[in-house]
Image (tube, rainbow, N blue to C red):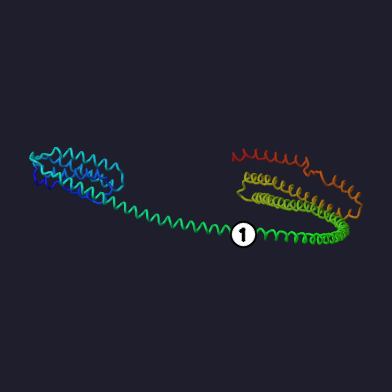
Amino acid sequence: MNSENFEKHVLFDRISQLSETLQEEKTESKIDLEKLSFFRTAVSYIEDRINITFPDLVQKSEMDELSAELNAAVSQINSYIGNNNIGHLTNATNNFNSALNKIRNFPIPLSKSSFNFSRKIANFEKIVKNKYNALEKEKDDLGKEIFKFKEELDKKNTNIEELTEQLKIKQNQIENLNSTFQTDFNNIKSQQNQEFKSSKETIRSEFNSIKTNFEKEIEGIKNTIDSDTSSLVQDLETKLDEAKRLVNVIGNVGVTGNYQNIANEHKVTANIWRVLAIIFMAILSGLLVYTIWDVSSENYDWIKSVIRIVAAAALSYPATYAAKESSKHRKLETLNRKLELELASLTPFIEMLPEEEKRDIKIKLVEKYFGNHIEFEKNGDIGKEELSIGGFEKVIKSLIPIVKNS
């Protein structure tokens, strides 16, 4: 390693940084005397050893390793100053021991060294004196704080004594107030008991008087209610009889109203069937008239005439059915109109009769008006209807071959 690189190496900066750190006041106050002396002596030894080392015989890696150990020692010392963890001083001691082992291997002259033990002893005395001054300063600061705490404690004791005296005064006042309150309470209690007994007697006499008056009034109201109730019961019985008559009339109207509605429905149905029968008969008559009129033409086709006659015959069945349905519904309309008229006139007719005769008449009328069924279709009509349908089918079957041949 040449002299220029040797002088520019970072190791010299590390030694200067470490020396400044160990000379600071806070470092002297926190690190104990033994370790601080060891650190400073080690730095001084390393610096002196570097100064007499042959640069050409030293390798750069040796310088780098020594610089790394000193840098680690600086970091550990700063960490201890920051958090007071004694483990950092132990690590720093280990770093210095490692650095000392490395510096001993550096090549130096074998002539007498310029190491001055007197100067080192003087430096040590200076370190001890500085440490002593720092301890004295801490002692003075602690004395001032203790004196301050003592003054505050005296003030607190004085305040406690004052509060104790005030507490005794307040306790006496409370006892006096309690005694006064108890006396006043007993007096008020006695007075209130006398007033309560007097008020109780007065209220009881007034209550008895009011009770007597109420009993008299209630008796009078009871007699009045009995008389009013008797007249009200008579009125209600009269109204009950009138209501029964009204119910009979209303029930009559309800029954006859149903018959009237049924009769109206049959009337509408009979009219519809009548219109249908008229329409079918009009079509039938039109076909027959057209067939008769077409006979006189030159291009008369008897097959078409037969078909028209058959069509007219086919229309006769729905026309006949519609006429029969119209007649049936008309009969039902007439029957319901008759029942409505009889039931409507029944109640006025028997109203003035005795109740027993009314009941007998109503029993007989139930057998007449309820449970009887009227058959409007006759077996002969059904038979005729079946024959007409069969005949109509035979006519159609006989005309089909003729139409095909033509």
In the depicted structure, whether residue 18 falls above or below residue 110? below
Q: Say which element carries label 1.
A: helix
Q: Classify the position of the C terminus by image quarter.
A: top right
Q: Is residue 182 left or right of residue 214?
A: left
Instruction: Name the residue nearer the viewer: 66 or 262.
Output: 66
Instruction: Name the residue nearer the viewer: 201 or 4.
Output: 201
Q: Is residue 371 left or right of residue 130?
A: right
Choose top left, top right, bottom left or bottom right for residue 68.
Answer: top left
Tell me residue 111's x, y (percent): 7, 40
Which residue is denoted by mark 1 in the rendering?
Answer: 176
In the depicted structure, whether residue 179 falls above or below residue 1? below
Tell me residue 197's x, y (percent): 77, 59
Q: Residue at x 72, y 41 (%)?
A: 388
Instruction: Name the residue nearer the viewer: 119 or 206.
Output: 119
Q: Classify the position of the N terminus by image quarter.
A: top left
Tell me residue 320's x, y (percent): 72, 47
The three-letter amino acid code for the residue at tag 1 is Asn
Tell me residue 79's x, y (percent): 28, 46
Q: Is residue 76 left or right of residue 11?
A: right
In the depicted structure, whether residue 212 falls above or below residue 88? below
Choose top left, top right, bottom left or bottom right for residue 189.
Answer: bottom right
Q: Residue at x 15, y 44 (%)?
A: 117
Instruction: Name the residue nearer the viewer: 40 or 216.
Output: 40
Q: Callout 1 environment at 10 Å: few (<14), some (14 to 19), or many (20+)?
A: few
Tag count in the figure? 1
